[in-house]
Amino acid sequence: MNMVLWKYRRFILANALADLRHRFSGSVAGYLWNVFVPLAQLTVFALIFSVLMGNRVEDGPPGTFSFIVYLCSGLLAWNAFADTLLRSAASLVSNAGYLRKLPLPEQIFVAQEATGGFLTAGISISLFCLFSALIAHWGPFWPWLEAVPLLLLFMGFAYGLGLVLACLNVFFRDVQPFMNVMVLLWMWLTPVVYLEKTFRDPHHPHPIVVRILHANPAYYYIDGFHTILLRGRWVAPSTWGICIAITLGFNLLAAAVLHRCRAEIRDVL
Amino acid sequence: MTTTLTVPLTQESPPASAAGAAVSVRNVTKQFKHYPSPGSRLTEWLTGGLLCRHTVFTALDDISFTVKKGEFFGIIGPNGSGKSTLLKILTGVLMPTQGGYQVAGRVTSLLELGTGFNPELSGRENLINSGRLLGFEPAETRSKLAEIVAFAELEDSIDVPIKYYSTGMAVRLAFSLFAHVEPDVFIVDEALSVGDIGFSRKCFERLDRMRAAGCTLLFVSHDLAAVRKYCDHAMFLHHGRCAFLGSANAATDVYVEAMSPGGKARGLGLPTAGRPGPAEASQVQLLARMPAGLARAFQLGDFERVAAARAGRVGTGAVRIVAVRTADQYDQFKSTFATGERARFHILGLAEEDVPHATVSCQLVNRMGIAVWGTNHALRTGQTTPVRKGDWLHAVFDVKLELAREEYAIDVGWGDAAGEGHVFDRITSVASVTVLPGIHVDFIGLARLECHSEVGTFASGVSASAGEVGTVASEAGVFAVPAPASSVAGRARK
């Protein structure tokens, strides 16, 4: 299965790049929307959580930029994950034109979305690192380099889950609207915009909420990004282990689902 | 070039089992599941198939054939007969439910021209993109770009976004890209007739070159003329079954015959000769009562054709039409002819009463309902035939079909006189013939009227040394009298 992806690597990469370039084609601002949208989102979250609610981060940079650095360190990766998931779910249906006529393997269209997600997040995280080091005077840190393999694993997870969803979406178009709701819910089940310590407050402990957060597979990746980007520390081997296991597990699941549905996917499309 | 191709669209597979076979298909069956609603699929899935909610539609039923290397193989059949499904299986887009197939070497399909063209991108960018889909490095496509663009005759608009192209332009671009891929097995599904005449001729010339290079072609088309001209063998698919497999000429004949208004499309795939039904039984009896010479001239199908023509039959019934046959000059059944070819229409009548005068008529009607030609034996010869009850009447019209490419319905009838008079039995559209263009089409319009043409050039007159002589371009004498020495006369006789 990975052999297939390797065989089509050029196609995947070229399409992912073309997609980023053409996603906003026809608009005046063009590819600038790739930057505007996350920037606007970050501003809103920063206003609400930092300025209005006065959230402060202890293990990050001191001062005004503290919460912004926290937000970026988790949200940039999360956005790429959520976006990849939603686009992957729709990818087989939206590429039906190809699949109906060419003997292309299904998974390359999902891989293309995951590659796009990796590129977007890679660029935005790099920009964030520049911002952190130059403007917030936080870093650079060597552990930042670990963001690359972690992002790869995270997008690998998005690819696995996205492929399963994409297969199901061929048969039941309900998957797409359902995922729109699920991803929103999932974001609030992951500590990306609020702080986990809110639920660890010794005066008002929420042990159940903490347990739910830890049952969420995305938590470990986001925790990893916080460790790397916010705290400037190396990710613990146990977190690496969990992340690798989740990515691998979902990829195996995806391979099994695709193998089972493949013939029928072509018939239905 | 071929060795550097990395993938897609094309599938590498071990050589087909039969020696020299480029494509071998064994017992391929394809079934589709039809669910009444997405919900019913969910019900079936959740119950593990316990509650079966789907119906099975068989698109292909036990298809087997072999195409030799370098052979051009046609697949014909009406819409919905399974042609595209078969090609999709061979290209790997669909998977067969049962059976298997092998393709030796690389397959490239032209299933739908311009698949993957992005309307926002220019022709050039799309070529590179599609090349990538075909497994070409962009550099490799670029090196062939000039050739491809020149072939498509799109030098002026290659940098314009595809959305501004006409359908014909997009098709030309796609075909020239595919034509330059040079695969081992090339699959073409309806397409080549889209461009203008000049371009489709170029496409066919390209196909000729590919054949010379040992390329195998699977050709799906409704263009029977092209199938006859280019294919060695052909398969006639009908309702997902192989109704006929053999030479391209025979296959197109069977197809046209089966699809003609009075044809026996109903029973195709199951040769009717086997076990005659009740209606056919009476035809068999009729055949048995006939004189031996006549019985040899007609076949069961000729009777069926008449028996099947219920609508549009009028007359007193004094002489009944019992069989109609379209045949070649050796009286072998034939329904597809080239322009200018001789056809023989046999009409068999049986007298139910004594009649003093009987004559027969025959006409060809095109799709627009225009009778392009028709005649009556009495009109031609001034003679009618007296017949007694129980007599057989065998009429033959020997016609040179100098007609444009089209399908023509045949109306036949028996009556007592040409024009006004009693009609004994008249059937419209009892049979049909298809006229296909010959190799060289030299006319337009409905009919190829006998024609002589000539061009003379004359000096501009001032020097007038031989001018006076040259102007003699009289009508009758022109072919007998040698052209004047001073004029260059081109002369053609058809």
Image: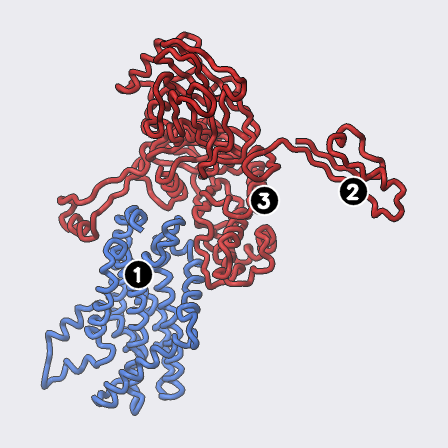
Chain colours: A blue, B red
Q: Which residue is mark 3?
A: B202
Mark 3 Cα shell of 10 Å, populated few (<14), some (14-19), many (≥20): some
- Judged from this view, the residue extending furthest toward the front is B420
Q: Which residue is mark 1?
A: A90
Q: Toward the viewer: B60 or A126?
A: B60
Q: Which residue is mark 2?
A: B457
> Is residue A153 toward the left or the right of residue B483 in the image?
left
Please report, as a chain letter, where disc 3 is located.
Answer: B
Which numbered disc flags the more N-terminal residue, 2 or 3?
Answer: 3
Residue type highlighted by circle 1: Ala
> Is residue A263 toward the left or the right of residue B476 in the image?
left
The percent coordinates of residue A177 (x first, y second) are 24, 64
Residue type highlighted by circle 3: Lys
Q: In the rendered structure, are the residues bearing label 1 and label 2 in contact, judged by CB atoms less than 8 Å apart?
A: no
Quadrant in the rendering for residue B80: top left
Quadrant in the rendering for residue B316: top left
- Name the residue: 50% across, 40% down: B184
Marks 2 and 3: same chain? Answer: yes
Residue type highlighted by circle 2: Thr
Helix, strand or loop at label 1? It is helix
- Name the residue: 32% across, 32% down: B62
Q: Which mark is residue B14?
A: none
The percent coordinates of residue A8 (x first, y second) are 42, 55
